[in-house]
Image (spheres, rainbow, N blue to C red):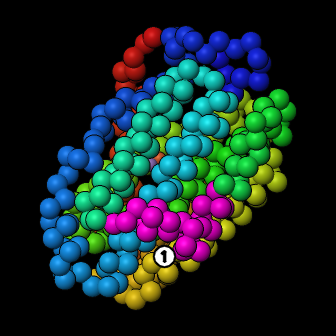
Amino acid sequence: MPLLDTDAEHDPNKILPIEYDWAREYYVAGVANNWTPEEIPMGDDVTQWRGDALTDAERQLVEWNLGFFSTAESLTANNLVLAVYDHVTAPECRQYLLRQAYEEAIHTDTFIYCCDSLGFEPEYLYGMYDRIPSIAEKDEFVVDMTRVVDSPDFSIQTDEDVLDFLRDLVGFYVVMEGIFFYAGFAMMLGLKRRNRMVGIGQQFEYILRDESLHVGFGVELIDGIRVEHPDAWTDAFEREVIDLLTEAVELEKIYAREACPEDVLGMSSEQFCEYVEHVADRRLRQLGLPTQYGTDNPFPWMTEQVDLNKEKNFFETQVTEYQSGGRLDW
Ligand code: MN
Ligand code: FE
């Protein structure tokens, strides 16, 4: 069965035999990462938050990121269930989408848990996407990229429909989960390594680990659709994707500068901007597109400890497994 079934007669019931082993591997990797926010104690965070352990600038980083992620996670979950699931008909991919949807529910729950533990008024935290222009603009940017697919009349018949769908996948997997989450990841993990809000920091580490898989799956899916619809992916679309990613980088930099107007624990907004460029180049490389920045990673600890190594290790492991012929044979 193809990844996108343009034929109304498709049968999405049978999962075996599996055609797309990579989808199965992402599912298994996702299950192996299982966690829930309640496993992480928040006592130290509550003490720091209620006391005077944090500077105003540190508090702002926490608020901005809780504000952005609390609603971005459910936006992502909605796109997954209401748009992506409908059109990706290969059953092993749908199986992964179900797993991812569960992880998005865990992430959404994490911010409920944080909001509760720290004693935020829900309207305050969950209203930030409305109040803070740089958060609103990120949300609107991905929603705009996915508007066509969201229409109830949308179905995939022509190459143009395939491109509309690919734009949706680029919007959520590459821009939202792959770029818009990353200034926030660096900010929260930067606080954690200096012993600020370590419980929330650990939750962000778990989310980052999940998101690395989401981005990886999304890129594989985009590649797979590209192979199955070779005439759909045009040079003009390639330019469009590069433009969308560079626009997204500019929005993420505005967010970083607003969230971090002054240096915090030796980290500056300029470094967060460099980090975003560095991550965007990686996304372009993953998509087989030319890199645009050539910016060094200003936070080597992100690579060493948590982020790109995890992505890299996962891909290296996958390659090794393919080469060793140790794949499960269905
Ligand atoms: Mn998520
Ligand atoms: Fe995700």
- Up the image or down, 281 lies above or below 77; here it is below
Whole-percent x, y for residue 122 in the image: 40, 61
Whole-percent x, y for residue 307 in the image: 36, 56
Query: Mark 1: which secondary structure?
Result: helix
Name the residue at 52% across, 43% down: 77
Whole-percent x, y for residue 312 in the image: 39, 49
Describe residue 212's horizontal placement relative to residue 116 as left or right: right
Viewer-nearest residue: 168 or 102: 102
Whole-percent x, y for residue 295 in the image: 51, 73
Name the residue at 42% across, 42% down: 105
Name the residue at 42% across, 81% down: 260
Name the residue at 50% across, 68% down: 128
Q: Which residues are magenta?
A: 120-142
Ligand 1 lies under 8 Å from the Cβ of mark 1: no
Q: Residue 79 falls in which quadrant of the image?
A: top right
The residue indicated by pointer 1 is: 256
